[in-house]
Amino acid sequence: MIQRLPSLKRAVLAGSSWTLLSVGAGQLIRLGKSLILTRMLFPEAYGVMAIVWSVLYTLGMLSDAGLAAAAIRHERAHEAGFMNTLWTAKVLRGFAIFVVTCLIAYPLAAAYKMPDLAWLIPLAGLTMVINGFNSTNVYSQQRQMVYGRLTFIELSNEVLGLFVMVIWAYFRPGVEAMIGASIVSALYFLICSHRVLPGIKNSFAWDAAAVRDIFHFGKWVFLSSAIFLVYTQGDRMLLGQYLDVKLLGVYSIAIMISEIVSGVISKLNNAVLYPALSRVISQDRHRLQEVFYKTRLGFDLILVFPIAVFSMVASDAIALMYDSRYHAAGWMLQILCVRLFMVAILSTSEACLFALGKPKYSVMQNVCRAAWILIGIPVAWHSYGIVGVVWVVATTELPVFAVLWYGMAKEKLLSPLLESRSALALLVGAVVGLGLKELFH
């Protein structure tokens, strides 16, 4: 078993390279899309779409039954019957979400006093139906840590989405351009997942034993996801009641750019670190701490250090990239970098505990995050306005340190000395960022 571990290092390095290429280039395209559309559309469009995508994300998280995690981690994930059953469940989930969007669209439009939500939400819900039919070979490629073709599909999909959105917005400016491009991109990814990726040909199947296995593990994922969505979408849902649509749109720009970074972190954890640590646990559990902190050192260099640099120049970057209507997003983004730093540190511990089959820590941390958001935002809004709200969002990870570090210590994996390397990367990055800021001015 131990002889196979050197191949793990190569797989992690190759997987990290492909993942950084895919998500990094994809997020740069997303940023470019934002820069173009903010000049073609109005801030209110971003405010409306913030609500639409929050609703879709909420429904997606509430219906998360751990399908992706089961496809990567389960010992039967190489069996066609198991994967086809999982695919069938995924298809049913997509249709169920669409039905719910049709049922809740009008009440939400009335609650937010945004009539367009009545048709925008169901239209966006079509993407969930399409995504449900995506091939399970996407998960198989991640489990095997083979990312070449998947990276090609993801990047070409981003380029196609950008092209469609810009052309659509040019001829008909409005939120329809965003949703229309999302539907076209979803269809393209669906076709490529079946035609380009190697593996089984999905067909409808229902294996009762597989269903029990999937949902037994998925009950923890569901609970964690249901609470996690309050943390990730609670700010936009609550602020939809407090802010006008224009200011909500500006806030959405700051959140969008911060999520470019958090998207890279999440992708590295889900596509590289989680499969790699799962492999270590199955082959040589005694080397888990060593492999974990070697990986963390790489995360400190490619994530923590750049985040610290960026935090010093965030407001200048916004002023350079966007017109004056969006400049307020600069100070918001600078504060939100506090959360990005903590996420870069803590997400690796979460992936490690999840790979150990300890999803309860994910539930516990999301309870802390949700409570922080639900209690903190109303209090901060009434006391300090939008500045207080942004600080509440930026500090949601503070209680998570206690939860995850407790779990890591209990599993005898925590090393305070090695954890301190992240603080050093932060300090050096901040100094470099201040130097760049002075040079910029």
Image: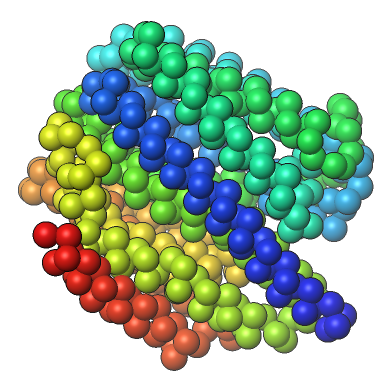
Q: Position of residue 258 (x, y in %)?
A: 34, 50
Residue drawn at point x = 56 percent, y = 20 percent: 183
Residue drawn at point x = 13 percent, y = 35 percent: 324
Residue drawn at point x = 36 percent, y = 78 percent: 425
Q: Position of residue 155 (x, y in %)?
A: 59, 40
Residue 20 sits above or below residue 106 on the image: below
Q: Position of residue 342 (x, y in %)?
A: 37, 66
Residue 313 sits above or below residue 85 on the image: below
Q: Position of residue 421 (x, y in %)?
A: 41, 83
Residue 400 appearing in the image? no
Determine whether, in the image, residue 6 is placed left or right of residue 187: right
Q: For the image shown, how many numbered marks are present on the structure? A: 0
The quadrant holding residue 268 is bottom right
The quadrant holding residue 424 is bottom left
Residue 102 sits above or below residue 311 on the image: above
The quadrant holding residue 244 is top left
Colour setup of the view: rainbow
Along the viewing direction, whichever of 103 and 240 lies nearer the viewer: 240
Residue 79 appearing in the image? yes
Along the viewing direction, whichever of 204 and 429 lies nearer the viewer: 429
Residue ranking furthest to the left? 383
Along the viewing direction, whichever of 428 and 228 lies nearer the viewer: 428
Residue drawn at point x = 33 percent, y = 29 percent: 36
Determine whether, in the image, residue 195 is placed left or right of residue 300: right
Residue 146 sits above or below residue 348 on the image: above
Image quadrant occupied by the C terminus? bottom left
Image quadrant occupied by the N terminus? bottom right
Determine whether, in the image, residue 417 is placed left or right of residue 397: right
